[in-house]
């Protein structure tokens, strides 16, 4: 499929859902009128029964009320379906918006911003309009953390290849993947994570009071005693109603002793029914499909005993629904007075917890992994023109038509670039605004994508796995009493330590030592480059200082020069943003200053 085909596919799906949702809304309105009609008719018949006393009228009224309740249930299912499809529609419209340069409705990863990280802050990996923001299609908290972890550190070669296979297989079921994502998007982001922590850490302790065998026996026997007393009271009447009343009073007192303990458990799970339903449906989808890739199959092996995980989750959901009956005061009071409903439910919950807690928590990991993989598969689907990187064990980097993934295709300028067969320091000189910084970020961001298991923005991309470290965006800090120069020194120290520890390090530096004088800046940059050369650490050094380019004469095998320049058309400047071999010979600072009324050629007139 081409990019045009992708847009047309999204537009077609959007049109279909709009038509379906319109029909659903009409059907829901019809159910509303039918419910109203049945309810009013039932009320009239009940009134007629009290006036004339015909038993047949009462039976008809009861059937009408039952019909009313059935319609309520059917209508609620249609309302839920409409909400689901409207959310699907929103997510499809989000894809069109993102492809058009709009803002993604998913989380932007601001929580993962870390100025001390080796590269994420410099490369705009997290935060508004970042790589993560463009890529992320994760709704659950665990999945957002999983995807962020993939972007923070390179995976192994084997793990990357496994992700490639999984992502490509998930792309082939794009519409089913959309349904998977929609179910999770409807939930509160932290709900499943909070529930998982509660099940793993707290639930067992809160249910320990049910360990008493005497308590279990009483809870199991009381319903039979109560129902027997009710039957006797109905048939014999008289004093038996008083006996039943005393029994129910005793049941109420018995329940009151445990109410606070029940409340604590219920408070943690009462909102979880819908989340567990979504969780169960998604896990069942994963369980039922035949997967060819090893990654998902291996994840399934960890949670696939005799009873499918989806059934275990459904069992838990049913227990939560049972416990939620107490939210209706009349229903809850009846059930607890006659059946000790809440305590019986907690006993079942305790049995469930003892048998299934570990596999349920493992299931959260499965779903987080699949949700993160769906983010990568969505990127794959949206960009058929991008390619999967070819990962190599031996030192290599060769990219064709390499572009920055966050720059719109119509504005993006692509470059070809390759490293030498051995590690070199590549010095990039050039004019202001010519594209040096963007090129460094283009290489860095595509490496991050490649090492996470994603497609990259290129026509071909061959690389070994590197450990990126960068020096681009240096900030002072009043709070920490850190000047710009001190911040630069700290960053350089971190890079030196990092490159000594990591043999696969790759350095990206944009104009180092900006906070000092020109002489010290040159000397500092020079000695730093010599350090990289001595360590055989590859990397890019972008600089305005042409003297640095002269180091190629001293290190012809270890240092290469590249540049970005300007083209002059009359008095106008033109940037082609193409990287070229050699050092830069044209600069534009004087032209830019002249444009605002500062002519460097007139400086003698000011003396």
Image (cartoon, rainbow, N blue to C red):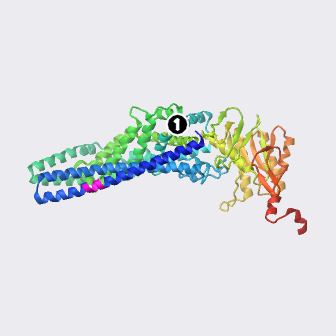
- Point 74% across, 53% down: residue: 489
Would you say 323 lies left or right of 117 here? Answer: left
Would you say 95 lies left or right of 419 here? Answer: left
Question: In the displayed image of the protein, which residue is found farthest to the bottom?
Answer: 606
| Viewer can see residue 337 | no
Would you say 463 lies left or right of 525 here? Answer: left
Residue carrying label 1: 172
In this rendered view, identify the residue nearer to me: 585 or 195. 585
In this rendered view, identify the residue nearer to me: 153 or 224. 153
Quarter containing the N terminus? top right
- For the stretch drawn in magenta, the main secondary structure is helix
Q: Residue 335: x, y in percent?
A: 25, 50
Q: Is residue 470 magenta?
A: no
Range covered by the magenta-colored residues: 33-37
- Point 73% across, 54% down: residue: 488
Mark 1 lies on a secondary structure that is loop
- Point 79% across, 50% down: residue: 543
Q: Residue 40: x, y in percent?
A: 23, 58
């Amino acid at each position: 499929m081409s990019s045009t085909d992708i847009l047309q596919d999204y537009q077609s799906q959007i049109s279909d859902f709009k038509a379906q949702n319109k029909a659903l809304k009409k059907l829901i309105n019809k159910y509303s009128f039918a419910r109203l009609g049945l309810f009013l008719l039932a009320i009239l018949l009940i009134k007629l029964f009290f006036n004339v006393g015909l038993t047949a009228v009462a039976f008809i009224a009861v059937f009408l009320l039952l019909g009313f309740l059935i319609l309520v249930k059917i209508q609620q299912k249609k309302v839920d379906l409409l909400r689901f499809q409207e959310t699907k529609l929103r997510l499809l419209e989000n894809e069109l918006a993102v492809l058009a340069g709009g803002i993604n409705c998913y989380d932007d990863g601001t929580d993962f911003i870390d100025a001390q990280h080796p590269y994420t802050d410099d490369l705009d990996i997290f935060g508004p309009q970042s790589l993560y923001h463009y890529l992320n299609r994760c709704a659950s908290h665990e999945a957002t953390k999983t995807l962020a972890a993939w972007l923070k550190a390179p995976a192994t070669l084997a793990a990357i290849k496994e992700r490639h296979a999984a992502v490509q297989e998930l792309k082939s079921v794009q519409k089913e993947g959309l349904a998977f994502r929609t179910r999770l998007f409807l939930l509160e982001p932290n709900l499943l994570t909070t529930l998982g922590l509660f099940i793993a850490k707290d639930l067992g302790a809160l249910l320990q009071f049910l360990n008493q065998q005497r308590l279990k026996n009483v809870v199991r026997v009381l319903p039979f005693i109560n129902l027997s007393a009710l039957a006797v009271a109905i048939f014999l009447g008289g004093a038996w109603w008083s006996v039943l009343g005393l029994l129910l009073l005793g049941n109420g007192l018995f329940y009151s002793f445990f109410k606070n303990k029940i409340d604590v458990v219920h408070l943690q799970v009462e909102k979880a029914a819908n989340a567990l339903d979504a969780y169960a449906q998604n896990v069942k989808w994963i369980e039922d499909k035949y997967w060819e890739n090893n990654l998902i199959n291996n994840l399934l092996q960890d949670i696939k005993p005799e009873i499918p995980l989806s059934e275990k989750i459904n069992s838990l959901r049913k227990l939560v629904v049972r416990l939620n009956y107490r939210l209706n005061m009349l229903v809850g009071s009846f059930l607890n007075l006659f059946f000790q409903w809440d305590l019986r439910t907690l006993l079942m919950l305790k049995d469930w917890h003892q048998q299934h807690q570990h596999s349920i928590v493992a299931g959260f990991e499965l779903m987080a992994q699949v949700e993160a993989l769906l983010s990568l598969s969505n990127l794959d689907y949206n960009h058929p023109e991008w390619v999967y990187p070819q990962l190599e064990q031996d030192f290599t980097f060769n990219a064709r038509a390499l572009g920055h993934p966050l720059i719109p295709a119509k504005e993006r300028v692509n470059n070809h670039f390759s490293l030498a067969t051995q590690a070199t320091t590549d010095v990039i000189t050039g004019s202001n605004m010519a594209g040096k910084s963007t090129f460094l970020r283009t290489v860095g961001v595509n490496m991050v994508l490649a090492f996470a298991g994603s497609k990259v923005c290129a026509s071909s991309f061959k690389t070994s796995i590197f450990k990126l470290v960068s020096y681009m965006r240096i900030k002072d800090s009043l709070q920490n009493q850190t000047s710009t120069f001190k911040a630069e020194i700290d960053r350089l120290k971190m890079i030196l330590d990092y490159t000594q520890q990591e043999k696969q390090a790759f350095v990206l530096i944009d104009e180092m030592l900006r906070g000092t004088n020109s002489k010290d800046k040159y000397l500092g940059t020079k000695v730093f480059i010599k350090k990289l050369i001595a360590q055989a650490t590859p990397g890019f050094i972008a600089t305005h200082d042409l003297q640095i380019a002269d180091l190629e004469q001293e290190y012809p095998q270890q240092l290469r020069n590249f540049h970005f320049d300007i083209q002059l058309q009359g008095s106008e400047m033109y940037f082609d943003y193409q990287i070229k071999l050699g050092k830069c010979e044209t600069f534009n600072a004087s032209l830019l200053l002249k444009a605002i009324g500062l002519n460097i050629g007139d400086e003698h007139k000011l003396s």
